[in-house]
Amino acid sequence: MPRGLQIGEKFPVATVFSLGGEEVPLASLCKGPTVLETGSITCGLYCGRITGMNQLMNEFPDFNFLLLYVREAHPGSRIPAHASMHDKLACARKLCAAEAEQRTVIVDRLEGTVHQELGAWPNMIFVINANGNIVHRGDWNHVETTRHVLQKYRDGSLNGLIDSPFTRAPWRVEARVFRRAGYDALWDFLRQLPMLIWNRWRQRKAKK
């Protein structure tokens, strides 16, 4: 995985797409403090956090909440990897029809320009201040950690790294994700899981 942007660095100046396929400057969506998560319809970790993130959006109306649709985390026979921008937009719209996602959904380019710059993990979380600087980054979104970060940001006491745990149980993902993607997506998840855990452990050890 690429290193990705870190705390204190500027968030990318890039163009993304709306669900309707219109190009949108990312900066125009990040006016004021912003919470941006990455996800896809085949990412069980992301789908398991939608309800919690919707709650956070209601608790913190002074923040912009965005979901950046990226590559399929675990493509399968029913939802394969994107072959075109048309496919990627169609999957993002399918996500909004299938899940109770209340945030603004934007779509990265087919080649994943923004996702690669951020670090390319499937379910990342970023908190960006009004100046466009990253004040929190998590390789994996953890709703309670994100809530803690937003509370500290709001009261002016956010200072330094607050690590996001991988998850309490990384194998506990949403079964519906694999049913709709195709059960070969489950095999893809199980195949990737040991390496994801290893990379995460190695990164956390390097930060100590």
Image (tube, rainbow, N blue to C red):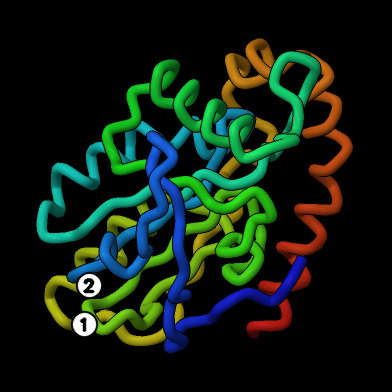
- Residue 81 at x, y = what percent? 75, 33
Looking at the image, residue 178 sits to the left or right of residue 28; the answer is right
Image quadrant in which the N terminus is located? bottom right
Q: Which numbered disc covers residue 157?
A: 1
- Residue 94 at x, y = what percent? 49, 21
> Dot 2: what SS?
helix
* CB-based contact (under 8 Å), mark 1 and mark 2: yes
Relative to residue 81, is residue 196 depicted above or below?
below
Image quadrant in which the C terminus is located? bottom right
Residue corresponding to mark 2: 152
Q: At 83% across and 43% down in the image, what residue appears?
A: 192
**Amino acid type at mark 2:** Lys
How many residues crowd mark 1 within 10 Å: few (<14), some (14–19), many (20+)? few
**Amino acid type at mark 1:** Ser
Q: Quadrant of residue 15?
A: bottom left
51 or 86, which lies in front? 86
Q: At 69% across and 39% down in the image, what residue appears?
A: 73
Looking at the image, residue 125 sits to the left or right of residue 206; the answer is left
Looking at the image, residue 27 sits to the left or right of residue 109; the answer is left
The count of marks equals: 2
Q: Earlier in the sequence, mark 1 or mark 2?
A: 2
Q: Quadrant of residue 78?
A: top right
